[in-house]
Image: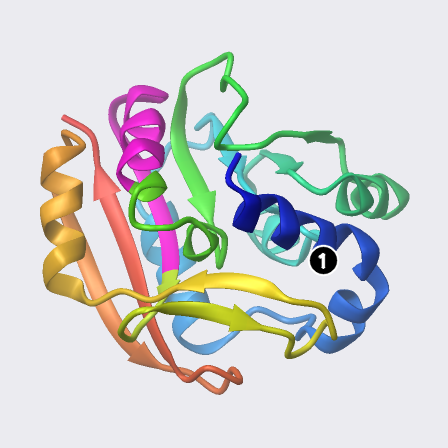
Amino acid sequence: MTGANEATLRAYDDHVRAYVEGTAHEVGGAPRDWIDRALDGLPATARIIEIGSAFGRDAAYVASKNFAVECTDAASGFVAELRARGFDARQFNLLTDDFGATYDLILANAVLLHFNREDLPRVLAKARAALNPGGRLAFSLKGGEGEGWSSAKLGAPRYFCYWRAEPLAALLAGAGFARWSIVEAQTNRAHADWIFTIATAP
């Protein structure tokens, strides 16, 4: 892992309560529409894994649509939080750990934005390799230019890398995805500009 990634994980591990208290507990607006699109047409038996489940908000929404979802997080504090809330969760770091299985949907809301421009192509290719034929990778990024650190919400520094749709499409092609949808949306989050992507494996 890079130093930036390690520092970001420490920030989450040390401030689980601040994250839970400072994050919306209902899925709505553009994020909900994006998750609905990611689930659309999947069979009831679809194998779904969420990367960065945090306290389980998005997993609970997916479950409300009658899908089973495997919860994971790289921060041990969030794994403990998930288990305390009744989720079956395991610790999983997308940069360093193997998936160990293949999936019909990999969901990562506000997770891949913590990876720098060197790591993201590798992460996309790794996720692509863990998808069944026709499987989907759904992820969200913050829209913008450059990269930087922010102590907002947690009171501890987290690394963020910002993206635009055009260079992101080139990365998806390079990672071997067959097709994708990239939706840029304004949200009511502290950072308003977001990119919601669904990429489909061949």
Give x and y (percent) for residue 24: 66, 75
Asked if residue 106 is among those painted magenta in the image, a careful observer would answer no
Q: Is residue 55 visible?
A: no
Q: Quadrant of the C terminus?
A: top left
Identify the residue at horizontal 16%, vertical 64% (top origin). 165
- Is 72 in front, or is 93? 93
Using the image, determine if residue 39 lies above or below residue 19: above
Colour convention of the picture: rainbow
Please rate how many residues cluster around mark 1, counting C-alpha atoms within 10 Å: few if below 14, some from 14 to 19, many from 20.
many
- Is 45 in front, or is 32? 32
Q: Quadrant of residue 11?
A: bottom right
Identify the residue at horizontal 41%, vertical 24% (top origin). 103
**Residue range corresponding to the magenta coloring:** 121-140
- Is 82 in front, or is 73? 73
Q: Is residue 104 visible?
A: yes
Identify the residue at horizontal 61%, vertical 48% (top origin). 59
Using the image, determine if residue 97 lies above or below residue 183: above
Q: Secondary structure at mark 1?
A: helix
> Which residue reaches farthest front?
3
Q: Is residue 200 left or right of residue 158?
A: left
Q: Amino acid at mark 1?
A: Ala
Give x and y (percent) for residue 164: 20, 67
Give the residue at mark 1.
11
